[in-house]
Image (cartoon, helix red, strand yellow):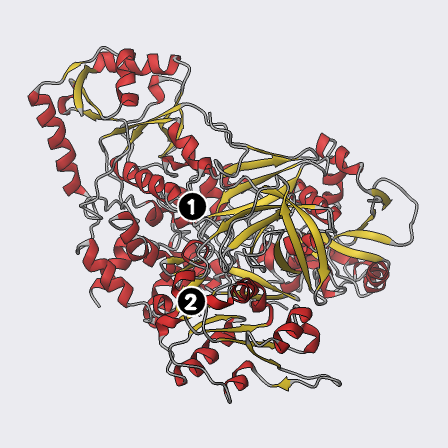
Amino acid sequence: MSKPKVGFFDFASCEGCQIELTNFGDVAFLELINHIDIVEFREAMSEKAGKLDIAFIEGSFTRESDRKRLEEIRKRSAIVIAYGACAATGGINALKNHQHDYHECVYGKDAKAPHLASNIALPISAAIKVDYSVYGCPMSRDEFIRIVSHLLHDKQPIIPNHPVCMECKLNETICRFHDGDHCLGVVARAGCGAPCPKDGIPCEACRGFVSTPNVDSLVKTLINKGGMHSSRAWNKSRMFTNNQRGDVK
Amino acid sequence: MLDYNSYENNIFYPMEAKILNVKQVTELERHFSLKLANDKQMTFSPGQIMEVSLFGYGEIPIGFASSPTRKNSFDIVVRSVGRVSKAINKLQKGDSLYVRGPLGHGFDLKAFKNQNVMIVAGGIGLCPTRSMIQYILDKRSDFKKFTLLYGSKNPNQRMFVDDLEVWAKSSDVDFHETVDQGIPGWKGNVGLITTLFKNLEVESNTKVIICGPPVMFKFVIFELQKLKIKNEDIYLDLERRMKCGVGKCGHCQINDHYACIHGPVFSLDTIKHLEEAI
Amino acid sequence: MSSYFITRANFEKFIVKLIQAKKKIYAPVSKKQSFIFDELTSFDDLRLDYDVTILPPKKYIFPPRQGLLTFDKQGHNSLIAPEDKILLGVHFYDLKAIDMLDNLFAANNSDANYLANRAATTIIGANIQKISKRAFWGSVGKDVRPHGYDGFIIKLDGGEGYVYECYTDKGSALLKSGDFSNASPAQIAASMDINERVLKQCPEKLNHSSKEIATKVRSTFKEKQLWEELADDCFSCGSCNTVCPTCYCFDVQDNWNVDQVSGRRERTWDACMTEDFAKISLGGGHEENFRESKAQRFRHRIMRKSTYLNETLGGPACVGCGRCSSACTADIADPAKAINRIMEL
């Protein structure tokens, strides 16, 4: 098996998932590097390669001008993987999708500067065909390694499609709702191992929704058990799932 | 402590099997002839299944596609649909794969003895039933009239074309075949498998085996009822999402039945009340 | 069965001695306002006054993630390597559940990956001192008595000490670690009374016999509206399955190690309430899900707990621990509520 050529690309994002990769530093990632040939990686190198076996794309698609670059990556890559919440679902960037005044609020008199012009934030899949997604903000390293390992063997990766709740139960974590708190774990895609509730922090669904989230039941639960008023309960899941909600723009 | 590195003591410990021969059957299906690496005989009944695995990829349940009367090897047909099957279908002659079995209940051979038998197979449903077909042909005098109906989507999807040719000419089996859609050059019947029932001569005391895609069952059963064949004489070979193959993991459960241990062969009488079965 | 008595002071010495011995002890300990089974390292951590634990003790016999095999270029090896251990302080509803799992894993094709762990485990029950808010063990499968455990501890009222019931050689083997005397008839009578009394104190109860329930629930299979209504708020999260002491469905997956050559085949707890549980791939990107709706999945779970396995187990596959009821965020999983509602139809 010749080493697959791999490239990393970034769009609208904090580049945190790339940093997460270069920060791996542990045995797992160093070992993985023996099996892949990283030929493009802006955070770590400047060269540009031609054909790629796997393109990893980070960040959301939020400027029409990015479409061309994405299409160019798609054209020369056998497999495209959107990694991290921004690329997979639009992530936290999509918070702006239902706002109008954030430019003025954030940039004041410079709000109209041309480089600030952007559309709503969308997942990479809104511009090009994405083969697989690595969810999470940041993405999960273990899942990343597992997905790459599967692809090295031409095996379709398995991505969980059940809510985070199950992972909390496996951790014997006390439910946030039992602690008088709220949580989005009931509709959030598992696979992270539920570290946030374990630390007493509600799940914000950074891995996005499961494929069929029961949103009505979520709102009802946030009101009845989480003590939220109805508009907050309705808006609560926007942080990471704006593009997956029923009121998507 | 018991030696758990043996299938006898550990049902999850697979045995190595060598690939004696591979044939590409259709675009998606490959036909493997296997032999256990320890040279032991695989003893099974027609209709039983095996868990077939490739390490790293996982396991899938597959029915035996050859008769236990043919002792040199045992056959399976693998359709490239998922992670495991795609990986298995890249293997070549001389490679190894790993098996656990035989598992589940096959056809009740005692009940079929000295009876009229009809097998209705659709698509890849011919693979698990081929075991029974070969068995009947090898022990022909043990059975009365033997009728075989086979339907495939189109002529390119026909399985075991060499066998089909032999069966068509044989006086041991009343063989009828159809395809849902013809292609230029196809001279045989065109139409759904139920159209084969039109001029069929079948006694009402015939034991019938059905195996095929889920939609086929209902329509074939309807035709059989017109022929006054009793539910207890109708056997279904049900393919389900079996995982462990040994009645534990729960994936193949149809109400209170596990396809992998109570089946995969069920009499219609046993499962007709099971709403999730067909 | 023989009954022994140990004073309160000697009981502490007994537990300390067990902790110091080589075998690991797993027992109820506190976790914030809840309880879990965990390795016991000090007598002070032992909370025999627990109401219920988040996960049932089955996790030590049928672990949530259990390696079945390792594989590499040379071949494959079983990962069965049971650890000798004591499971201490198991309530009777969990003893019942373990007994059911023992039967299910031994039946048809006996599963050495479970049975080897089970054989290496000494199980010591304990009476229920505190009752959880959602318990209904007093009224479910009343004729089903647990078997297969090795000993049982009953704390006598007034705190004078404990009665220890010995059922097997494994149970008797512990006697040498403590200062036990033969229990007096009065102590035995008192301990039996304690176990009898607690049965009547559950906050929830089933109003019908297991047989009546099995028949009636089964007959509602086609009541689409009923099941849709019961499952309306379901998140399909699988929490009810995950905390259930009698659920034993699992998934099997292979993964490679980082060297990309060797790897592991392991089984993990699975949950029939999740959307993908009954999904099969048909090829060409097509899939079939034979329990596609949450109502079908909810029905499957209730049926499985109240009718499907009854013949095999001699009673319902629910022990009334109430774990699912409290684990369910939408608060719809409670079998007692669902079944009582169905019985009133």
Q: What element carries label 1?
A: helix
**Chain to which mark 2 belongs:** B
**Chain to which mark 1 belongs:** C
Write down the quadrant of residue B222 in the picture. Answer: bottom left
Amino acid type, callout 1: Thr
> Cα distance, mark 1 to mark 2?
26 Å
Asked whether the viewer can see residue A181, the reply is yes
Using the image, tell me which numbered label, if any, was put on residue B277: 2
**Residue positioned 89% across, 54% down in the render:** A51
Q: Position of residue C173 (x, y in %)?
A: 29, 17
Write down the quadrant of residue C61 in the picture. Answer: top left
Residue situated in front as seen by the camera: B117 or B7: B117
Up the image or down, B255 lies above or below A54; here it is: below
Crowding near the residue tagged with mark 2, few <14, some 14–19, many ≥20 C-alpha atoms within 10 Å: some
Using the image, tell me which numbered label, if any, was put on residue B154: none
**Residue positioned 76% across, 37% down in the render:** A32
Q: Where is residue B123 in the image (x, y as percent from the top left)?
A: 60, 71
**Are the residues at dot 1 and dot 2 in contact (C-beta closer than 8 Å)?**
no
Residue situated in front as seen by the camera: B32 or C211: B32
Amino acid type, callout 2: Ala
